Every structure is written in structure tokens, then in C-alpha cells.
Image (cartoon, grey):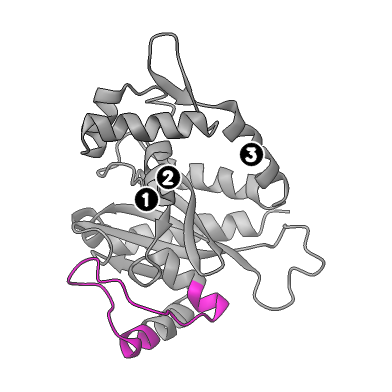
Amino acid sequence: MLSLQKAANILGAFSAEQPEWGVRALASHLGVPRATAHAYLAGLTEAGFLRRTPAGKYRLSWHLAEMGAQLTASLPWFPEARALITRLALEVRAVAFLCILEGEEVVATIRERHPDADIELPLDVYLPATATASGKILYAHADITPRSFEACTPSSITSLDEWKTEVAKVRRLGYAYSIEEWIPGQCTLGVPYHALHSGLPDPHSGDTVVAAIGVQMSAGRYLREERSIRERVLQIVREAETLP
């Protein structure tokens, strides 16, 4: 059976720059045998998520667009957040992202990559909460204690004491960062996104964080430009949150 993560990786390979995939090219892209890639594509086509073109390649199905429209229509804050991700990608010249919580799962719902970004667009949809900036922000604001710690790299948090120290820092600073804790050679900076214009009955009551947004880039660039990147991201988000 096709796992959710494998399905997410395949669907994430389709983009405006790469709207079609053949079996051979996708197998090479994912680093899997051709037979495996063919089975993945056939399964997603049968489920209605992909369609096969007359040339024998695969494209996303309109069924996905219909599902996405239904989902985003239920989130009044989503269009503003999408525009904000585009602005972050353009102005910081990096990969920009928006992540939300589904239960205790950290889900990357939007990613955009500036053409000059120094990393490729990550394919993972479900992210390790304790190894990512998004996970730290979302768990801190939802007051969730991790059930386990995923050691993605030697820099990952692996104990409850480390986690408590990190969460206290996130709450104090108002942002989070992950320095080679999820993917070797890459860093992320994330900030909470507040539902100030979400249509909620009272957006100022309690913690109104609905998502974590931020940027991802090479560790080299992040460490060289950390302060300026952080200040620019915080400025852009604060401006967006104060718009009428």
C-alpha cells in the first residue's frame, strides 16, 4: 500500500516548473526503481489524484484543486497567508513555507522557492516537530509535549530537558530556528502567524497562532546573514499582521 508520506513526496514533485513527470524521470528524481515509481503513479492515478496524458506522462488531477479549494475556503486567513509566503520567498530569496498542526502532526501546507534560492524545494509534507522551526513554534503555542524525539541529524534535540529549554527560548524570543537539526547543511527560521483577520469571534482572546511561517536556506547563508534575515522576516510578518 502506498504510504501517506510516499504519496506526499510524489505529489510534491509536481510544480509549475515541472507540471509533468514520466516514470523514468520521476524514478531518478526520487531515487527509486522504475517499477516502484510506476506503481506509485498508477496508484495515485487510480485514486484520482493524478491523470495520464496522451503522451504517457502524468499530471496532477483537477480533483486535487477541488479538494484544495474546499479546504482553503474553510480557513479565512489562508489567502493572506499565501500572499505573505510569496512575499517572503521574493524578498528573502529563499524557500518560504507555511506549516500548520493536524493533531500533533506538523504539516507543510505551502512552500514557494525563489529561483535564486540556494537549496531545492523540500518534498516532505509531514515534518519532525522537534527538529524544525515550525514544529517548535506550533508545539510551544499549543503547549504540546512531544511523545518522542526524532534524531534526524547529530544536532537534533533528543531529550525532554533540551526540549523544555528550547521551548522557553522560543516563547521568549518570539521566533524559532533550526540549525542543521532536520536536514544536514540547511537551516530554517520560523515565526508564529496570528489569526488577526481570520474571522474568528474574538481573535485577541488567548493564543491566536494558526500557523508557523518562515524561510529555509543553506546553513552557510543563514549563519552569514542570520541577523539581517531574522529582522527582515519579522518585519514582513509584522507588517502583514497589522494590515486592516
Q: Is residue 144 magenta?
A: yes
Q: Position of residue 118 (x, y in %)?
A: 25, 43
Q: Earlier in the sequence, mark 1 or mark 2?
A: 2
Magenta stretch bounds: 139-165
Q: Label 2 is placed on what type of residue?
A: Ala
Q: Position of residue 157 (x, y in %)?
A: 28, 77
Q: Label 1 is placed on what type of residue?
A: Asp
Q: Disc 3 on helix, strand or loop?
A: helix
Single out the mark in the foreground, 1 or 2.
2
Q: Is residue 212 magenta?
A: no
Residue labelled with disc 3 = 67
* Marks 1 and 2 close (CB-CB < 8 Å): yes
Task: Please tell me how many numbered marks the rendered image carries.
Answer: 3
Q: Is residue 218 left or right of residue 128?
A: left
Q: Disc 1 on helix, strand or loop?
A: loop
Which residue is rendered at x = 44% and y = 34% of the image?
Answer: 43
Q: Is residue 175 visible?
A: no
